[in-house]
Image (cartoon, grey):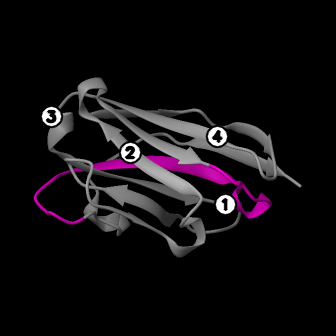
Amino acid sequence: VQLQASGGGLVQAGGSLRLSCVVSGGSFSSYNMGWFRAGEGREREFVAATTWSGQPTTYADFVKGRFIISKDNAKNSLYLQMDGLKPEDTAVYYCAAVYGTSRMPSIQEREYDYWGQGTLVTVSS
């Protein structure tokens, strides 16, 4: 199973970006998936997650109301729409997948079996 994240870049504060994660191999429609991020000098932290069906979703408090996670099983793709970006959102963003045995989104790193390489998001002030 391979995950390829893309869509990062440089954006001004208040702007938007849409991250994508394409999964090859395995059964995408069976995976619970999530987004994590790691800022410079900081440990990787949970951002958002969803189940194999795309519902329900869950978010870290610091992105609620600004980010939306979605899953398109027909395109083997996971997305993260990021609006209202802040300089503190600057980080490498990683997508992750795990076979969906749970009906609830997985928010712990240790729950995930597969990881993408990350895509850098830089938000300027």
Give the residue furthest to the bottom. Answer: 61
* Residue 85 percent across, percent down from the top left: 71, 54
Q: Earlier in the sequence, mark 1 or mark 2?
A: 1
Sort mark 3 into few (<14), some (14-19) or many (20+) by Cα contacts within 10 Å: few
Q: Name the residue at 75% across, 47% down.
A: 122
Which numbered mark, 2 or 3, is in the foreground of this view?
2
* Residue 119 percent across, percent down from the top left: 58, 40
Q: Which mark is residue 70?
A: 2
Q: Which residues are magenta?
A: 83-104
Q: Are marks 2 and 3 in contact (CB under 8 Å)?
A: no
Tell me which amino acid carries mark 4: Leu
Q: Earlier in the sequence, mark 4 or mark 1?
A: 4
Would you say residue 84 sits in the magenta stretch?
A: yes
Q: Which residue is mark 3?
A: 27
Q: Name the residue at 64% across, 68% down.
A: 42
Disc 2 on helix, strand or loop?
strand
Q: Is residue 6 above or below residue 100?
A: above
Q: Which residue is mark 4?
A: 17
Q: Earlier in the sequence, mark 3 or mark 4?
A: 4
Q: Earlier in the sequence, mark 3 or mark 1?
A: 3
